[in-house]
């Protein structure tokens, strides 16, 4: 039996640059041990990273500051929420809620009154509408009578003519 010597892995370092160096060294160790079955052809061309060297002349990038989070009002709001222990958005005081509901109700009433004002009809308009309806009804009745007269048999038409003539004759005699 082959006895292989197992080396315990070193403890990971704490600094960022040290962690990068550690990860790179560990990757090289796995490659040399043959953990990968077939090394990719590209891996032989990959150069070691340049940023492992500690060069103090280089300017290190800083994370950009979010202008919203940096604003004083946002910080105050955040502090207030933390101190209150409230997880939801700021709730309005009761007085403010009552005032807003009254304003909302008043606007609704005002809109209803405006709609009713547009719908209301003056007395003159109402009288004109009544007369117009009466005239339409009379016209419909006359049209209906004319249609009935056209449908009536001829002897009824002759009889009506005779009545009219007889009425006219009696009036002439009375005079």
Image (tube, helix red, strand yellow):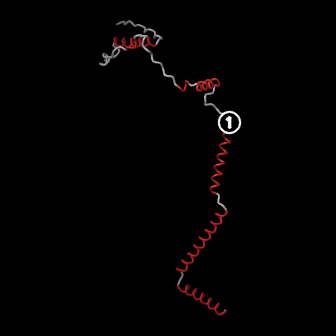
Residue 126 found in image quarter: bottom right
The percent coordinates of residue 60 (x first, y second) are: 45, 15
Residue 49 found in image quarter: top left
Tell me the residue that label 1 is attached to.
Answer: 96
**Would you place residue 142 above or below residue 36 in this image?**
below
Q: Residue at x 33, y 15 (%)?
A: 47
The percent coordinates of residue 77 (x first, y second) are: 61, 26
**Would you place residue 129 above or below residue 5 in this image?**
below
Q: Nearer the viewer, residue 167 or 30?
A: 167
The percent coordinates of residue 89 (x first, y second) are: 61, 31
Q: Residue at x 45, y 18 (%)?
A: 61
In the rendered structure, the answer to whether residue 124 lies left or right of residue 3 reads right
Residue found at the far right of this picture: 95
Q: Nearer the viewer, residue 91 or 121?
A: 121
In the rendered structure, the answer to whether residue 121 lies left or right of residue 154 reads right
**Would you place residue 160 above or below residue 117 in this image?**
below
> Callout 1: few (<14), some (14-19), or many (20+) C-alpha neighbours within 10 Å?
few
Residue found at the far bottom of this picture: 173
Q: Nearer the viewer, residue 150 or 77?
A: 77
In the rendered structure, the answer to whether residue 72 lies left or right of residue 21 reads right
Quadrant containing the N terminus is top left
Q: Residue at x 64, y 32 (%)?
A: 91
The percent coordinates of residue 175 (x first, y second) are: 66, 92
Q: Nearer the viewer, residue 27 or 134?
A: 134
Q: Residue at x 62, y 89 (%)?
A: 168
């Amino acid at each position: 039996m082959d006895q292989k010597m197992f080396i315990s892995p070193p403890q990971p370092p704490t600094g960022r640059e040290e962690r990068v160096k550690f990860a790179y060294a560990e990757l090289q160790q796995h490659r040399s041990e043959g953990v990968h079955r077939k090394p990719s052809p590209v891996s032989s061309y990959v150069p070691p990273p340049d940023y492992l060297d500690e060069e103090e002349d280089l300017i290190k990038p800083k994370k950009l500051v979010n202008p919203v989070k940096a604003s004083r009002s946002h910080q105050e709001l955040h502090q207030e929420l933390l101190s209150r222990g409230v997880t939801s958005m700021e709730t309005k005081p009761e007085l403010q809620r009552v005032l807003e509901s009254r304003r909302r109700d008043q606007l609704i009433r005002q809109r209803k009154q405006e709609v009713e004002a547009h719908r209301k009809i003056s007395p003159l308009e109402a009288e004109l509408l009544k007369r117009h309806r009466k005239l339409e009804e009379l016209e419909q009745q006359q049209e209906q009578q004319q249609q009935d007269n056209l449908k009536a048999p001829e002897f009824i038409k002759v009889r009506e003519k005779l009545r009219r003539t007889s009425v006219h004759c009696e009036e002439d005699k009375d005079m």
